[in-house]
Image: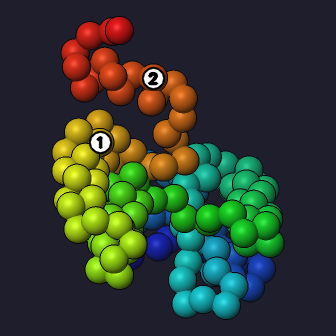
Amino acid sequence: MAFVTEKEELKPGLIIFRRGDVDHRMWYCRMKMPKADRYKTVSLKTTDKEAARERAFDQDADVRFRIKHDVPVFNRPFREVGREYLLTQEARAQRGEISKARPKKIRAIIEGTLDKYVGSTQVHLIGDELWGGYPTHLFGHRF
């Protein structure tokens, strides 16, 4: 069975399609990222083809806006961002900008309690409400 079924090109670099590997009939869109060999695929959360076309153009406009205004197109989990931060701190320690012990402390926090609390959460979903629950999670009670 083909993964992509009922494919329709709306414009160069923008298609809608259904997936052949799932039981539902929802539409998806795939957008080619400009100046990159990469695509973004999004569920359009509709079974209606006309609605799917409209939503695909909306998604395409959103991606173009994000690129124009230097806003990330792809979301990443906290765990990935934490690892990147840790690498920068380790490089700083190697250059003597911070102590060699500092990255070890940061690693313990990032890979310990923070990873357990928000490790797989997409960073764009982490806000004040989620952080407000962190002390409760960490210590098991409210202050």
Query: What is the CA distance from the residue labelled 2 to the residue labelled 1?
Result: 13 Å
Residue position for label 2: 132
Name the spot of residue 27 as percent of width and height, x first. 57, 57
Q: Is residue 85 left or right of residue 41?
A: left
Residue 87 visible somewhere in the drawing? no
Name the spot of residue 57 as percent of width and height, x first. 78, 63
Amino acid on which the number 2 mark rests in the picture: Gly
Residue 106 visible somewhere in the drawing? yes
In the image, 110 versus 19, the foreground residue is 110
In the image, 116 versus 36, the foreground residue is 116
Image quadrant in which you'd find residue 58: bottom right
Of pointers 2 and 1, the one earlier in the residue sequence = 1
Q: Secondary structure at mark 2?
A: helix
Residue position for label 1: 114
Which quadrant holds the N terminus?
bottom left
Name the spot of residue 14 as percent of width and height, x first. 69, 76
Q: Is residue 48 left or right of residue 11?
A: left
